[in-house]
Amino acid sequence: MKHVSFHLKPLPPYDFSLTAGAATYFQNRYGVDIFEGGVYRRLLEREGRLGLVSVSSIGDVESPCLKVRVIGWETERHASSYAAEQVAWLLGTDQDLTPFYHLSQGDPILGPLVEAMPGLHIPRTGSVYEGLILAILGQQISANAARVMRRLLIEKYGPAFEIDGVTYRGFPRPEDLAGAGVEGLCTQKLSARKAQYIWGISEAVAASRLDLEGLKNDSDELVMKKLLEIRGVGLWTVHWLLVRSLGRQDGFPHSDLALCRILGQILRRGSPLSPHETLEYSRRWSPYRSCVTTYLFAAMRSGHFYRSTH
DNA sequence: GGCCAGGTTCGCT
DNA sequence: AGCGAACATGGC
């Protein structure tokens, strides 16, 4: 199979396995992100055309280097630089952890986290739209229920690209989900409520009434204001997007149930903190709370420290 | 079968 | 503004 490959040097310390693991929530796949056998793969769209990137590590945490392979639009001009940009965004290779690590010194919660997972960067979603749809799918319901919905939605509406007999899927485009209609989405195990939210957002984006990608240029405050006007988006979702889809430094979903629980477990061996208490406690971590969020969730999900499941 | 789960909206004080 | 209820999925 024809392809082009190149190297990408992340800012050290950088742990590829941990970061790609966090991107896939420490499963083989999450959404359209795949991480198995030490290789991170994902379908990308460039000017409406699909391409597959495969990323693996050929360095170590202190002198990291990634090997990136592109199939699909490898012969086109600037394909490599586009792929490099996208991979850097997705796998957070551009992030400088130094100030966060400085803050974590002597912090009873962050210290052990950083020590256990040095070089974990913050993975990001392929687009703000993708992050928003995934967040809404994940609202309230159990992780397993959300996974079923994600898989069905992507299998049914995601653009397909076959390579060496394997079919890869990209994330559904706004027009794909808008075209599905609320009824169509409901057949994919979405509740009527989620279907309405997701259809409404997809339709607005497809019709250019809503510019989610443009949020990247707005201040945190303006992002908050604009997103909260969208039906189906609350505070939790905004903070989640600040961390995962907008690359901001200080996002922190203080109302997150799991977060409140885990902090309660660490700080007073038991009862969860209230969202308000969680927010107050988190102020000491500003302005690096996106890192804190990522490290806490990574610890919970990877079973590195804490048991996330009761 | 009932209860909970990585929230949000809507309707009540 | 602050609190409670409905919403409906998979899993124990």
Image (cartoon, coloured by chain):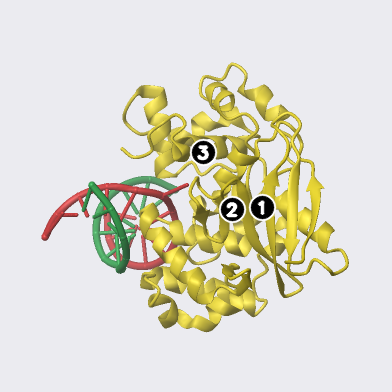
Chain colours: A yellow, B red, C green
**Where A89 falls versus A182 (above or below)?**
above
| Residue lying furthest top | A106
Image marks 1 and 3: residues in contact by CB distance under 8 Å: no
| Same chain shared by disc 1 and disc 3 | yes
Image marks 1 and 2: residues in contact by CB distance under 8 Å: yes
Q: Chain of mark 2?
A: A
Q: Residues within 10 Å of mark 2 (few under 14, many from 20)?
A: many
The label shown at residue A298 is 3
Report x, y in % for residue A156: 49, 75
Residue at the (65%, 56%) spot, across then down: A223
Q: Residues within 10 Å of mark 3 (few under 14, many from 20)?
A: many
Residue A192 lies left or right of residue A243; in this view the side is: left
Report x, y in % for residue B7: 43, 53
Q: CA distance from mark 3 to mark 2?
A: 17 Å
Judging depth in this view, the residue of A279 and A36 nearest the camera is: A36
Report x, y in % for residue A282: 53, 32
Kindly identify which residue carries mark 2: A241
* Mark 1 or mark 3: whose residue is earlier in sequence: 1
Q: Amino acid at mark 2?
A: Leu
